Image: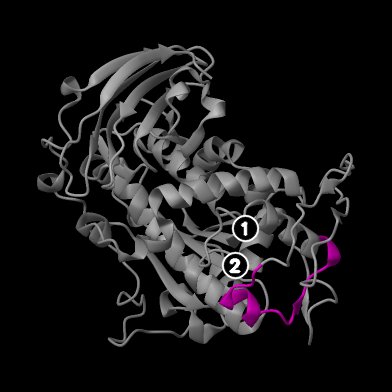
Amino acid sequence: MFRYVAATALRETNRAKVAEKIRPVKRSEGQQRKGSLERASAPSPPSISVFQAAIMHVKFTPEERDGIDYLRSKASDLLTENYDTDFNLLRWIQGYNNNPEEALDQMIRHLKFRKYYDLDNIQHRKNDPILEKYFPLGLVGPTGNENKLLVVECAGRIDLQGILLAVQLNTFLTQRLRFQEKMLSEINRMEKENGCQSAVTYILDLEGLKFDSKLLSVVTGPYRILWASVYSNYPEWIDEMLIVNAPSFIAILWKAVAPLLPERTRNKVKIFTGSDDWKSEVLKRCKPENVPVHWGGTKVDKNGDAKCREILNIPNDQIPKTLYWVPTPDAPRVGELTKIVIASGANHVVTFRVPFSTDPISIAINRFAERTYSMAVYHSDDEGAVEWELKKMNDWAPDFDYPGMPTVDRVVAPIPSGGIVKVKFGNEQAWFRSLQVYYRIAFVNGKDQPVPYECIARVEGQI
């Protein structure tokens, strides 16, 4: 991780002008970057948010400073004041091996994702009652050491099958994103207060985890995809992950999961069985008064609970079958959706013409797939976009992988305006197997009422 120290003033000319070129940065494997990155010209210095002004005493290395300024200048039209901090941008540089070009591509993808899911305001959405009760995840608070934040997840208590059968994909993803944004907000607060970069010390407690025939497929399927989505949208948020109370079959799980994780992520994971002295390892990273008693510290909640269940959700029960998902008019049975079969390495694109309106319009998508699939939404207000390739259009909802789940999903998100909208479903990662995807797409107004539209094309293999 990059080093930086507090200083009394910002480096000279740092805000007075944007450097003409970014200095070459060495890649992780000794590769030299070819050429130089031209700095976007600007008639005046970039604007400074309230947050940035509060941490202007921090001195970054010249390479870090140049990388941060490069990302800010290139993505200024997508950055919001809430997200635009030096440390948030620095994390993208760090996560992509000091390569500003690659970091920029991935950050722009995330910023579009942020806009599509309205992540700046996601905390205002209601919690899902099932996940709030049965999904064990909690933010404890600062570790008291090196400006880190402590998070505990009692994953061994998760009713994996129950969650998949009770909760729709978009609901689960929204709940996870709410928590990520809550952590990011606290990380930003600590960075502002202390003037140095923050990250999470993550305790993943597997106590209670039982092996069954479906566990491996769930862990390497839906949960892997959901975690991959988190990592690709929040680089460098974890400083270290301590997997504690690992069961005897952890080697089987790790062998299946580890190859699917980036090396940078794998190197941050440390695994401890129940017989290991993992509590002392926790206390090497956290002050005792900041760690619940159950995990080796001295912290209790207002009720004297050693697990601090006032702030941590630690369920002990399975999800009742009465809470399992059932079809509704908004999310009907699979048989009521349009079925497509996508060959390995291919995709399927559906094109719509949506009338322009002074009222906001959203796209409403029902989706279901037997395995992992990709999806993206493209938009243009140009009628000629009917004939355009996807890469010429605005990827309003950028391309991400989504896991196959046993529930029919429904996601509703605003589109920029009327015009041409293309929805792409993909099976690009498959080498041999075709994929069945089921969908229903409509357009609605702010009251979730249908608005007119025309489906004008369905094409397989468009790129």
**C-alpha span from label 2 to label 1:** 7 Å
The three-letter amino acid code for the residue at tag 1 is: Glu
Q: Is residue 175 visible?
A: yes
Name the residue at 50% across, 12% down.
432
Q: Which residue occupies 49% across, 44% down?
A: 229
Mark 1 residue crowding within 10 angstroms, few (<14) / some (14–19) / many (20+):
many
Residue 154 showing in the rendered view:
no
- Locate residue 437 relative to residue 432 in the image: left or right: left
**Residue 101 image point, x, y percent:** 73, 44
Look at the numbered disc 2 and give the secondary structure of its residue.
strand
State whether residue 22 is above or below residue 221.
below
Q: Secondary structure at mark 1?
A: loop
Q: How many marks?
A: 2
For the N terminus, give its image quadrant.
bottom right
**Viewer-closest of 461 and 454:** 454
The quadrant where residue 219 appears: top left
Q: Is residue 230 on the magenta stretch?
A: no
**Quadrant where the C terminus lies?**
top right
For marks 2 and 1, the one nearer the N-term is 2
The image shows residue 228, relative to residue 369, as above or below, that is below
Residue 392 shown left or right of residue 97 in the figure: left
How many residues crowd mark 2 within 10 Å: few (<14), some (14–19), many (20+)?
A: many
Q: Which residues are magenta?
A: 47-63
Q: Which mark is residue 199?
A: 2
Name the spot of residue 284 as percent of width and height, x first: 63, 75
Residue 378 occupies which quadrant of the picture?
A: top left
Q: Position of residue 64 (x, y in %)?
A: 78, 62
Could you tell me if the residues under marks 2 and 1 are in contact, i.e. CB atoms within 8 Å?
Answer: yes
Residue 451, compared with residue 305, is above or below; it is: above
Q: Of the numbered discs in the image, which one, if any, rests on residue 236?
A: 1
